[in-house]
Image: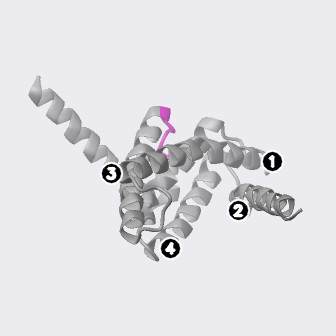
Amino acid sequence: MENELTEQKQGFLKNFISDWKGVFVKPKDFFAATTMEYGKALKFAGINILIYSIGTAFITQTLRKTLFFNPLLLFVYIFISTFLGLFILSFIMHCFFKIFGGKGSYKESLGVRAYSLAISIFSWIPIVGIIAEIYGLYITVRGGEVKHNLSAGKSVAAVVISLLLPLLLVFAIFATTLGMLRR
């Protein structure tokens, strides 16, 4: 019984490492060869988000630039908000893939976004994180091309607009709130 559990853990770890290398090194080939299994994609994202949350909480606590004084509370906040953000951003991205003529399903959009979080292992590291996030956009664009059968240009447009739209919304809310406070 204990051997079976150990073998399952080793198999899961081997699969995770194989998927991580595949999506990181050759994203277009990875997406072409991978069926978007909901559970597998979410586990993959969850592990990457876990590592990101631990690293971000550590860096933030080290720099002491946070409203959270409890590192565990900070970790939980980062993990939950990032995991929920996966679903929200995947939905927004899916809508824009469809607007640009994409053929894939929401499940495939979620899978593309989930696997693009492979970069999260590096995202928490200052400066390196910026490069990692840019590469994550590249992975997402490649996934959009393959899973939604889009040209590179349409996939880039869908990904960029889906990221800019929430930022513009946050900016508009911030500006409106600031304007209301000045009155």
Number of the front mark, 2 or 3: 2
Residue 85 at x, y percent in the picture: 58, 46
Q: State the residue in front, 176 or 170.
A: 176
Left or right placement of residue 56 versus residue 110 in this view:
left
Quadrant of the snapshot with the N terminus: top left
| Residue pictured at 37% horizontal, 54% vertical | 71
Residue 176 at x, y percent in the picture: 84, 59
Q: Are marks 1 and 2 in contact (CB under 8 Å)?
A: no
Residue where numbered disc 2 is placed: 160
Residue 113 at x, y percent in the picture: 56, 49
Residue 179 at x, y percent in the picture: 86, 63
Residue where numbered disc 4 is placed: 131
What is the span of residues highlighted in magenta in the rendered image?
Answer: 33-38
SS at badge 4: helix
* Inter-mark Cα distance, 4 to 1: 28 Å
Q: Earlier in the sequence, mark 3 or mark 1?
A: 3
Q: Is residue 129 above or below residue 7?
A: below
Query: Looking at numbered disc 1 in the image, what kind of residue is underneath it?
Result: Ile
